[in-house]
Image (cartoon, grey):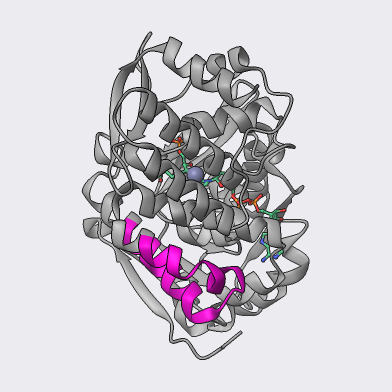
Amino acid sequence: MTRTVAPETIDVTLGARSYPVWIGRGLLDDHARWRAALRGRHVLVISNHTVAPLYLERVARGLDGLQWSSFLLDDGEAHKSFANVGHALQALATLGATRDACVIALGGGVVGDLAGFTAACWMRGIDFIQMPTTLLSMVDSSVGGKTGVNLPAGKNLVGAFHQPRAVIADIGTLDSLPEREYRAGLAEVIKGAAIGDTAFFAWLEAHADALQRRDETALVQAIATKVRYKAGVVARDETEQGERALLNLGHTFGHALETAGRYTTLLHGEGVAVGMLLAARLSERLGMSGAEDSARLTQLLQAAGLPTAVPAGFDPEQLLGLMRLDKKNTAGTLRLILWRGIGQAEIVTGVNEADVLAVLREATN
Ligand SMILES: NC(=O)c1ccc[n+]([C@@H]2O[C@H](COP(=O)([O-])OP(=O)(O)OC[C@H]3O[C@@H](n4cnc5c(N)ncnc54)[C@H](O)[C@@H]3O)[C@@H](O)[C@H]2O)c1
Ligand SMILES: O=C(O)C(=O)C[C@@H](O)[C@H](O)[C@H](O)COP(=O)(O)O
Ligand SMILES: [Zn+2]
């Protein structure tokens, strides 16, 4: 790995609630950058039992002299639960946190989503800072203010839009990230390009090997490009009244696969990878796109080491049932993100269930 890449700053522009996304190596130790904002405040660091032993001490050094405590989740998507929000809120109460308190989310998307939702709930909303430690959380979940938890009935069914005050993405933390988790993050990078950036898609095709090797120059460029793209969408449509729904490409299928697999079969990014291909197949079936674009997407996902087929054991009817609870739907109407080809995703309302089922049946054969 080369280690000389300069840090990047990308602003998420939301008026008085605008915030920076800092991307660079060593930012967790750059206390001068983030400590001043916490002066005199209670701080609750929410992390998990995998990440805290690796990185909490470095954050704690920046909290020296403040009244702070930590709340640690057990590891895994199954712990992004309503019950754990209750426990995190109790930790704020025990700390004596007032309305000026701040939550720090130190971890991947599970920690970030739950910590952000906890911050949104405590005393009707307090500040929080995202310190993402997975590639997926750096390029996606830490940016944009979607916070929430899962219910047994489905993914992210409870939540709030609550923007962080800052995102501090220390790419040095990725050095300890397992390979499978790193690849899952690449799925959300590829998703951004597949939705609306053909030049970025071609760049990813050309740099697939460099990204597999975690070449730092390529990695920072990929993270920054995806974050810049997402920041633009969020600035234009913070609460998903329109365009932001495009960021859900692959997610209606992907969330159903994650839930049906009880969060043990596919990681979120893997579900998104397979889900994007199912969306591409459905688009082909509806005459919106051609096989060539689906093939390019398949090849890029494969080059990133991601799954491109539904694993064995899934039931198409169960998946369709789960898709009916997706937040983009209206009563009785499936609303999916499909595409006309690379870089041209579209919101499609009133998708026929028979077409969806046919794609699911073919994919689970
Ligand atoms: N809010 C949003 O906009 C948004 C966007 C995308 C995904 N998400 C959500 O994010 C979640 C997925 O996030 P994720 O992929 O980061 O998964 P995750 O939070 O489960 O983290 C993945 C794994 O890596 C471990 N880990 C984290 N950082 C590490 C590090 N630096 N070194 C070693 N291990 C580390 C974790 O403990 C975990 O085992 C899902 O719940 C998904 O729904 C939310
Ligand atoms: O930020 C968004 O908007 C997204 O849709 C990003 C997705 O990658 C992310 O997985 C998000 O959590 C999905 O949100 P949901 O609204 O489908 O629950
Ligand atoms: Zn996602």
Q: Quadrant of the N terminus?
A: bottom right
Q: Is 30 rendered above or below residue 341?
A: below
Please provide the residue range marked out in magenta: 202-229
Q: Main secondary structure of the magenta part?
A: helix
Q: Please provide percent x and percent y for residue 114.
A: 58, 44
| Total tally of numbered discs in the picture | 0
What residue is drawn where x is 44% and y is 63%? 205
Please tell me in which quadrant of the rendered image residue 247 appears: top left
Observer able to see residue 202: yes
What residue is drawn where x is 51% and y is 91%? 4
Q: Is 122 rendered above or below residue 232?
A: above
Q: Nearer the viewer, residue 41 or 2?
A: 2
Q: Please provide percent x and percent y for residue 339.
A: 32, 37
Q: Is 21 rendered above or below residue 264?
A: below
Q: Quadrant of ligand 2?
A: top left
Reply yes or no: does residue 328 show up in magenta: no
